[in-house]
Structures are given as structure tokens and as C-alpha cells.
């Protein structure tokens, strides 16, 4: 292939008729004749050295490094770009140009997985070939036989090459609609640029990933890129104006050509839910759109916070031109996403057990508040921990939230990675004096279930759909849902340490 064909936005005089075999941003994959895209990082020079040793014919590098590389590697063909990550996204879109006609992307701190799952289910019920992709993996509304043929990336927001390759394969499999999670990391690192997002959603913004972004302002800026740099010019933006950051985003987009649909629970917006009723395993609410009442909606999911997620999914689909009555007709058929306020079962004494991915202060608060309403006059129990080598500032915040909102609290381990698990637990418990410390997560879950009484509700938070516990560099098989089922069935558990 010719370089000028895969980097059409650059000055072709720099490239002439240069050709290559393959393009990689991982130096370990380079073979003779390949192009290496040198992503700027602390080890970029070492990565370039590995690529050259492996036979790279051309190195694409940012302007700031060009002089140093020319000095160290004078015989290698270099191509200078403003952003190596952006160049990679352009190359990926040229190598894998086909994309489904309707692409939905959701960003925000909480709710992304549930929303893309709801979008996939609704569209599937309407007869569309739809898929969702994100934290819980790739899920199809139908035609699951094609799943093994798709190269499914492992990251929530994969690198540009993997993303475009997957979209190309999905298009070839007949998929017309894709809904995926747009992480702040992925947006900040140009992994989604050149993806033709036609409908974008914003859920909320609360403290998370500050170890990467440094501040809430920078975190928000990364999220905004979905709407200002990725969303197509004639696309639709669905925004939660019940969140202050959502209000700011809606104002930012007011003078842009995109179509904006705002939503909120019990507040002024285009799409509004109010008169909420919570029943066992379902929620009811009255829906208004652009001032017109659409009656009471019943959805078989638990958790009052799910109403915002449902509104976002509705708004994003309506933004793509599907009539609201069609969407509402299939709402009673949707189910919770795996590990997202998922009801797993009840104890022999009548206590209900839910598993949820809540791993941020806001998500834990929402989950506990939601289950408090379901528990009515009974007790709310919670089992949770915090991840190691991640934002440590949220640990005491989550401890305080649990202390304020739960009756029975067990603090345990949740992917300690390379940190001392007891230190993580101590940081949480500093603001949760009523908490009981049970480091082993299996024992913590078993202890919590044994303590349930009639009408009690137990939230096991933090891991959701995950099937492993990350301890140092080892992933130990662990699934909260399976552990719960084992406890509820009375089978003997073998602890894994």
C-alpha cells in the first residue's frame, strides 16, 4: 500500500511513492517493511529502536521528536505529524473504511454500559441488526453466530486500529447499528477520531480517573471531545441536564449544527420522567417529550437511577429518527445489563441480593439510594472495596457514602493490584467507622448473605460483570454473581487467595 493513500491529509511531497506492508503502533508486532507509528510516551525512543531492529521501513513520529530521531537513526525514513495518535486514527479509517450506518456513542462517568445495552435491546426488538460494545464486551441483539468471526478488542475503548477493524467486520456481518462506550481515555487519546458517530450521549460527570486527567476540568474536556470532534456535523446529542456538566455541555452545543435532545428526571428538559413508582423488579414513570405526555412507562429493571439511563437511550434512538411511540412499545421487554444492578437471587430468609459495577463515589451513592427505596423499612447491606493503583482520593469518600446510606457495611478487596490490600481497606474505613473488615471477597459475600433478614437488600458493588480479581500481575478467577449463587444454593465454597 502507498503511504499517501493511508495518510491523505498530509503533504504528499513528504511521502512520494513510499509503500509499506502493514501499520502498527506496537513495536513488538513490527516485521520487515512495516510502518511504525511512534506514540509519544516515556519509552518512545526505545520503542522506535525495537521497531527499527525488527525491520520497520518507515517511522511516523511527532514533530517534537523528529530532530532527535534523525540524529539517532539517520538512515530511516521518517514522517513527521502533529499527533501520532491522530495519524493512527486516520490510517485506521483508510485501512478499514466501512462502518455501520448508525453509530451511537455514550460518554460520562456512570451509566454507559447500561445505556448501550438498552440501545442494543431496543433496536433489536425493532428488528434492527444491532450490537453493543464496552465494559461488558461485544453483545448482539441477534445472529450470534457471527461473534466468533469478529476480532473483539479487550479495552472498553480500544486503540484506533482495533476499533476500525471491528467496525469493518461488523459491517460485513450485516450489522446496521452499533452502540458503544466512549471512555475519557479513549477520547483524549484520539482512539475514536474518524469513527462516524451519528448519535452521542452524555450521562453525568463525577469523580473518577483523576489519576489520569489531574482535575475535573480536564476530565470534562476529554468527554466534550465526543461532541465537538467526533460526532458528525448532522448528528444528534442527547444530554443529561440534570447534571451541571450536562447543562454546560448543552449550552456549548447550542450554536453548533448538531441536534440536541436534553433529558432529566423531574426537571425541565425535552425528555422528562416524573411520578416515579418503584415495585419489585421494575420501575414506573410518566414520560413527557417536548411538552407532550406519553403516559406511564413500565420497565422491568431495578434502581431509580436506571430511569436516567433509559431516558438517555430513548433520546439517542429518537435522535436517529426512530419514532418515540415505536421505542416506547418495546420498553417493557428490556432487561438490566450484566452486573448492572443485576438481581441475582434471594437468601433463605428472604433477603434480595444485587450485583452492581458501582466503583465511584457517585455510582455507589446512587446504587445505595436506589436500593433503600426498594428495601422500604428493612435494612440495606453493602459489600465493596476500591481498586489498587487507581484514584486513592475516592476511597474515604466511598467509605463515608456507605456509612451514611447503608445499615450494614463490609469492606473487602477489589482488584488490589500492586497495593497493600489492608492499606486500601484502611483508607476506606477511615470514614466508615461502622464498617466490618473482611479482606477475602468470598468470605465477605458469604458473611453478608448470612446476615440478611426478610425484606433486606444486599448490594455487592465494584466488580459487576467482571470475572477476575487482579492481585499483583495475576488475574484470579472471580465472579461476584457466581459466588452469590454458590452461597444461595448452600454449596461449600473454596476460597481463592
Image: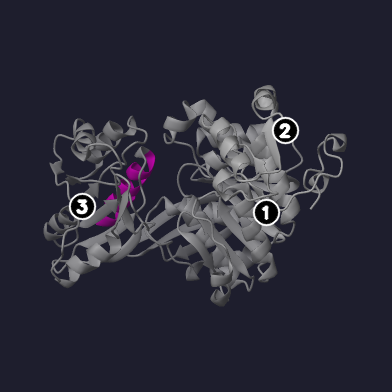
Q: Please identify the dominant SS of the magenta region.
A: helix
| Corner quadrant of residue 62 | top right
Sequence-first tag of 3 and 2: 2
Mark-to-mark CA distance, 3 and 2: 56 Å
Q: Nearer the viewer, mark 2 or mark 1?
A: 2
Residue at the spot of label 3: 441
Q: Nearer the viewer, mark 3 or mark 1?
A: 3
On the rendered structure, is 107 left or right of 476? Answer: right
Q: Is residue 447 visible?
A: yes
Mark-to-mark CA distance, 3 and 1: 43 Å
Q: Which mark is residue 75?
A: 2
Looking at the rendered structure, the secondary structure element under dot 1 is helix
Looking at the rendered structure, the secondary structure element under dot 3 is helix
Q: Is residue 289 visible?
A: no
Q: Is 370 a magenta residue?
A: yes
**Identity of the residue drawn at 15% across and 65% down:** 493
Q: Is residue 209 above or below residue 217?
A: below
Looking at the rendered structure, the secondary structure element under dot 2 is loop
Q: Nearer the viewer, residue 4 or 465?
A: 4
Sequence-first tag of 2 and 1: 2
Mark-to-mark CA distance, 2 and 1: 53 Å
Sequence-first tag of 3 and 1: 1
Q: Is residue 350 above or below residue 435?
A: below
Q: Residues within 10 Å of mark 3 (few under 14, many from 20)?
A: many
Amino acid at each position: 500500500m502507498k503511504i499517501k493513500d493511508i495518510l491523505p491529509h498530509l503533504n504528499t511531497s513528504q511521502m512520494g511513492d513510499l509503500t509499506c506492508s502493514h501499520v502498527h503502533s506496537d513495536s513488538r508486532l513490527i516485521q520487515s517493511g512495516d510502518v511504525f507509528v511512534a506514540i509519544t510516551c516515556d519509552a518512545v525512543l526505545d520503542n522506535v529502536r525495537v521497531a527499527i531492529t525488527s525491520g520497520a521501513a518507515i517511522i511516523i513520529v511527532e514533530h517534537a521528536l523528529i530532530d532527535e530521531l534523525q540524529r539517532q537513526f539517520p538512515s530511516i525514513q521518517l514522517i513527521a505529524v502533529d499527533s501520532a495518535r491522530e495519524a493512527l486514527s486516520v490510517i485506521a479509517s483508510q485501512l478499514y473504511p466501512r462502518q455501520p450506518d448508525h453509530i451511537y456513542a455514550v460518554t460520562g462517568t456512570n451509566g454507559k454500559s447500561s445505556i448501550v445495552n438498552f440501545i442494543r435491546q431496543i433496536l433489536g426488538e425493532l428488528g434492527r441488526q444491532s450490537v453493543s460494545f464496552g465494559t461488558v464486551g461485544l453483545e448482539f441483539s441477534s445472529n450470534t453466530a457471527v461473534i466468533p468471526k469478529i476480532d473483539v478488542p479487550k479495552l472498553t475503548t480500544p486503540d484506533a486500529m482495533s476499533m476500525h477493524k471491528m467496525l469493518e467486520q461488523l459491517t460485513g456481518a450485516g450489522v446496521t447499528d452499533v452502540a458503544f462506550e466512549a471512555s475519557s481515555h479513549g477520547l483524549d487519546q484520539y482512539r475514536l477520531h474518524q469513527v462516524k458517530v451519528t448519535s452521542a450521549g452524555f450521562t453525568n460527570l463525577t469523580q473518577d480517573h483523576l489519576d489520569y486527567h489531574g482535575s475535573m476540568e480536564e476530565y470534562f474536556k476529554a468527554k466534550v471531545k465526543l461532541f465537538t470532534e467526533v460526532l458528525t456535523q448532522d448528528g444528534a446529542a442527547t444530554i443529561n441536564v440534570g447534571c451541571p456538566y450536562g447543562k454546560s455541555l448543552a449550552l456549548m452545543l447550542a450554536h453548533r449544527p448538531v441536534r440536541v435532545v436534553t433529558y432529566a428526571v423531574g426537571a425541565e428538559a425535552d425528555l422528562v420522567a416524573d411520578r416515579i413508582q418503584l415495585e419489585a423488579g421494575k420501575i414506573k414513570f410518566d414520560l413527557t417529550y417536548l411538552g407532550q405526555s406519553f403516559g406511564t412507562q413500565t420497565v422491568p429493571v431495578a434502581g431509580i437511577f436506571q430511569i436516567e439511563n433509559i431516558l438517555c437511550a430513548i433520546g439517542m434512538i429518537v435522535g436517529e429518527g426512530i419514532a418515540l411511540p415505536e421505542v416506547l412499545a418495546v420498553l417493557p421487554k428490556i432487561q438490566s445489563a450484566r452486573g448492572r444492578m443485576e438481581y441475582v437471587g434471594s437468601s433463605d430468609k428472604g433477603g434480595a441480593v444485587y450485583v452492581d459495577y458501582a466503583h465511584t463515589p457517585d455510582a455507589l451513592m446512587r446504587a445505595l439510594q436506589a436500593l433503600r427505596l426498594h428495601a422500604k423499612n428493612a435494612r440495606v447491606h453493602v459489600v465493596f472495596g476500591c481498586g489498587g493503583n487507581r484514584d486513592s482520593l475516592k476511597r474515604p469518600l466511598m467509605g463515608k457514602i456507605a456509612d451514611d446510606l447503608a445499615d450494614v457495611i463490609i469492606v473487602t478487596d477489589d482488584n488490589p493490584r500492586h497495593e497493600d490490600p489492608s492499606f486500601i481497606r484502611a483508607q476506606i474505613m477511615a470514614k466508615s467507622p461502622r464498617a466490618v473488615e473482611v479482606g477475602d471477597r468470598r468470605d465477605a459475600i458469604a458473611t453478608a448473605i448470612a446476615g440478611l433478614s426478610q425484606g433486606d437488600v444486599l448490594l455487592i458493588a465494584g466488580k459487576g460483570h467482571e470475572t477476575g480479581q487482579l492481585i499483583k500481575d495475576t488475574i484470579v478467577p472471580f465472579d461476584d454473581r457466581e459466588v452469590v449463587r454458590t452461597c444461595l444454593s448452600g454449596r461449600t465454597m473454596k476460597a481463592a487467595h
